Image (cartoon, rainbow, N blue to C red):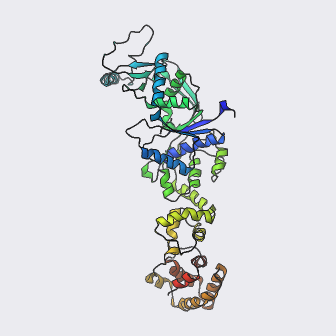
Amino acid sequence: MNAVTEVRTRFAPSPTGFLHIGGGRTALFAWAYARRFKGTFILRIEDTDVERSTPEAVQAILDGMRWLGLDHDEGPYYQMQRMDRYKEVIQKMLADGTAYPCYCTPEELDAMREAQRANHQKPRYDGRWRPEPGKSLPAVPADLMPAMRFKNPLDGVVAWEDRVKGRVEFANNELDDFVIARSDGTPTYNFCVCVDDWDMRITHVIRGDDHVNNTPRQINVLKALGASLPEYAHVSMILGDDGQKLSKRHGAVSVMQYSEEGFLRDAVVNYLARLGWSHGDEEIFSMQQFCEWFDLDHITPSPAQFNTEKLKWLNHEYIKRTEPTVLADMLKPFLTQAGLNTAGGPAVERVAELLRERAPTLVEMAAQAHYFYVRPAPDAALLAQHLGDAARPALAELKNVLPTINWIKAEISAAVKAQVSKHGLKMPQLMMPLRILMTGQTQTPAIDAIMEVLGQDETLARLVA
Ligand code: GLU
C-alpha cells in the first residue's frame, strides 16, 4: 500500500469506567485491521465529558489495552487537549457558512419542543436562526452568547455502504441542525469526532453500532469540511448468555477482571476475535494468525452472544497447550495471591504440568495446587471411610518400601501396584487412602504423579496412617 491508501484506524473510548468486553472487542478489531494492512492504529481518548471522565478510567483503558496486547502507533490523543483546534474549525465553518450562531435560550428550545409535541411532530430544532438567502433573522439579543449549529443539508439523503451493515441511508430532513459548540464555547461530542477523524486521516471507522445514528451527522460535517470520508464498519453489540445486552449482571464485563480471574491473554483475545467475526470453522488461532485473517467482510451484522462457558473452555484449551515453564510463570502470582509459599515445595512448573488438564483457569489451578505447598491435615473421618482393614498392612508395607526406590513415577507406581496384588486388594482400596493422605481430597490427578512431584521426603511425611 502506498501512503495515500495507508489504512488508519482508531479506537476512541470515552474514559468513564473500565475497558469492558465490548470496548475490548472494538479495539481488537480496529487494531487487527491496521495490523493486517500494515497500517496505523491510533488511540484517542474522548474525554470531553468532564463530569464523567477520570484519569483512573484513562489508566484502566490503557491497562486493559496493554494486557490485551493492543499497542497503538499514535496517541493517545486527548480531545480535551485539542480544544483550540475544534474552535479553529468552528471559526472556519462560520466563515464558510456551514455553521451559524443560534441565540435560542434553553427555555425557548423547550417551548419549541413542547409545541411540536403538541402538534404530534417530532421534536427538532426548527431552524429559526438558520441563515438563508432572503430570510430575515431575529434581532441578536445583546447579552447572550450563541451556540453554534451545523447547517445540515435540508433535503436529499445521506448514505454509506457500511462494511458490516450494508447500505445505510438517512433522509436529511430527519436530521436537524445540531449544536457543534455550546454557548459557553465547548464543542460537542459529535463534532469533535469529525474533526479528529479528519485530522487523524482515519480511513476506517470501526466502532459499536450504538453510533450508527451519529454517522449521518458526522458524514455531513465531514463533507462540509471538504474531508474525504472514511469507511464505516459498525459492529453489532454483544449480548449476554440470556440474550440481554451484556452488563454487570452477567458477571465480569471488564477485560481486566478476566485477567484477575486467571484467564490467559491469548485465550481472551481469541475469544473476543470470534465474537461476531469468523474465519470458516476456526476456533483456536493465535493473535498473529488473526491479524493475517481479519477482514471486515466476515463480521456478522447480527448481535454476538457472550458465552462464559465457551470462554472457559477456550481458556482451558490454551492452558493445556501452554508449555509448563511458561504456565508456571503465569501461575506464580496466583499462587502468591492464594497465600501459598512455593519456596521449599515442588517446582511450580511440575505442578502446573500436572494440573493443567483439570484447571480451566489460573485461579482454579492455584486453588488445586494448595496441597502441593501445604501438607493437608489428615481428615480422620474421610480416611476411615476409605481405608479398610485389608489395606492397612499394604499401606504400612508401602511405607517401608518407598524409601528404597528410585523416585520416579514408574517405580512409585510399581511399588503401589505390588502392594495391591500382594495383599489381594482392588486398586481403589489402596489408591484412595493414599490420595487422601497425600492431598486431603478424593479427586486429584494420578496419585503416582502427585507423589513424584511431592518428592520422597514429603510423601513419607504424609504417610502417617
Ligand atoms: N467515544 C465513543 C464511545 O466510547 C466512541 C466514538 C467513536 O468510535 O466514534 O462509545
Foreground pick, 9 / 118: 9
Pick the residue in front: 342 or 127. 342
Q: Name the quarter where the N terminus is drawn.
A: top right
Residue 238: percent from left, percent from top:
50, 45
| Above or below, 209 relative to 289 | above
Residue 53: quarter of image: top left
Count of marks overlaid on the render = 0
Residue at image x 51%, y 63%? 333
Q: Is residue 363 above or below residue 284?
A: below
**Furthest residue toward right:** 1
| Residue 300 can be seen in this image | no
Corner quadrant of residue 202: top right
Observer-nearest of 328 and 420: 328
Residue plotted at (43% across, 30% down) = 188
Q: Position of residue 434 (x, y in %)?
A: 54, 82
- In this rendering, position of residue 177 left or right of residue 166: left
Q: Is residue 381 visible?
A: yes
Residue 144 image point, x, y percent: 32, 20
Q: Give the percent coordinates (x, y) of residue 364.
A: 51, 65
Q: Is residue 248 above or below residue 145?
A: below
Q: Say left or right for 441 vs 118.
A: right
Task: Report the residue that reaches farthest toward the top.
Answer: 134
